[in-house]
Amino acid sequence: MEKKFSPQSLSRLFFMLYLLFCLFFTVDAQLPDKKIADKYGLIILPPNEKLEPAPEWLQKADMFTNGGGVWRDYRFVLKDTLMTRIVRIRSGNGPMEMTGHYPVETIGSFDGSLIKGVSLVSHIPHSKKAYEAAHKQGFKVIPYLHFTDIHSFYADQDVFLFQHPEILLKDETGKWVHISMDGSDRAFRFLTCANSPSYWKLSLAYVKKMMDWGADGVFIDNVGLRKPCFATKFKASNPEFPPYTHEHLFPDTTQNYAWDRLLQNISALVKSYGEDKIVLLNSGIGTPFQKNGDCCMWESFIYSWAWEGRRNTWADVKKRAQDNAWYLSTGRRITALSTINRSRKEAKDDAFWAFSAARLVDFIWWASLNGTGAEALYQAHMGKGLEPFKETNGLAFRVYEKGLIVLNDSEEDQNIELTLPADFQPKRLLDLYNGSQIIQVKNKKIKVVVFKKTARVYLLPQSL
Ligand SMILES: [Zn+2]
């Protein structure tokens, strides 16, 4: 039986859910406290719930990477800087000169030949030189940022906690809160308040700095629901800091609402550098904040650092794509990050499987391929899908302008003849898995052999 992707009804259902979500936020739209906004020099944009399409280049992207190994002689150094800070001394608390640490990231050089063809490099060093080096070799690059917590022992995104205690979130008992991650409370990382005008100002300034340096956008991690902040209720002064006041920009709202608006303001700032700039959110998919990104991320897609081998079945992938059709159909994108374990003998098959599963449903695949044997995938540019994928007897395939992808989810090896659409132009295709094997297209048909539980990518040779 032939099945087609994205049934209209499901897509409509999710669009309705999305509208309900918008309505919730619109009805609940808050005005910022003007006096406080003015005090911090903030211009707060009105809520923006429109889902504009992502830039054209992003819509056409096939793969992202964070490109380990491409930054030669990369160094992250906490540079010692003499500063004045209030310190507990025997007779009380007093200002002292002491050493603070500013991170400085440097690179010797950038070697783009290792990731030739990739559509975007994320997590790049926060260094103007890094942006310039990558651009010179034709790569789009974005840095990793985070706005949910702050490291306490160095200037995290230019913010020293001891200079800005007013940005820290407090729980209902008046305590600062460590960020909880992987089952532990991180000792040197504290949650920030998404409703703090000071934190807005500092965060927007850092995004501006990255964009001024030439970034093609930003990657924002930890874009999840926020804990409530009670810090405005606690007035006791803390002698470890100069006097400060914790204020809220939106006088009567939740952290989630303030976070939503902060993300929108960050996005507007990024877009002010050009419509081709992007915001990529590690929000997960099917979550309330993904709407604020041109692209959102499904972390641990099929393969993860957290487990061995394959999880998430092909059926799971299809289901999640259908659930997010409301988002994809507006021209926004989902990126699916897989950690391919190069020490596994199946590493190359793993890579082809995850790439194919992602691209069949219009996700952008994200991986680091060096040493997996599947490096050619960086250059696999499929072009526009000519039709949705089709599936027969557990074999899914989809035809694109420049080739096709075949994924065999069945328990049988399949030797099959596929019929291509009338507007498919290529006469010869390269089997990217085998590298040199050319397959002829005859009368709009192609014969392929795809082993059970594997996937193959066939491409117009010249497109590489
Ligand atoms: Zn707060």
Image (spheres, rainbow, N blue to C red):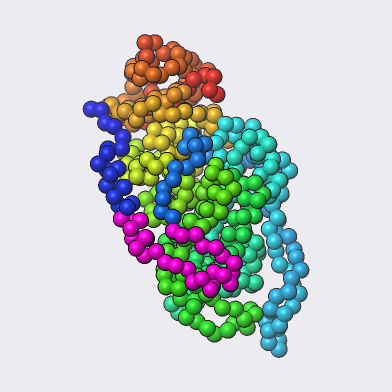
Q: Is residue 156 above or below residue 89?
A: above
20 with respect to 82 (left or right): left
Q: How many marks?
A: 0
Q: Which residues are magenta?
A: 20-47
Image coordinates of residue 366 in percent, x first then y, are 50, 40
Whether residue 370 is visible: yes
15 with respect to 308 (left or right): left
437 or 281: nearer the eye?
Answer: 281
- Residue 289 within the magenta-colored segment of the rendering: no
125 or 311: nearer the eye?
Answer: 125
Q: Quadrant of residue 404?
A: top left
Whether residue 186 is visible: no
- Residue 37 within the magenta-colored segment of the rendering: yes
Q: Quadrant of the C terminus?
A: top right
Q: Quadrant of residue 370?
A: top right
Which residue is rendered at x = 73% and y = 60% of the image? 79
Q: Residue furthest left?
A: 1
Q: Is residue 462 above or below residue 33?
A: above
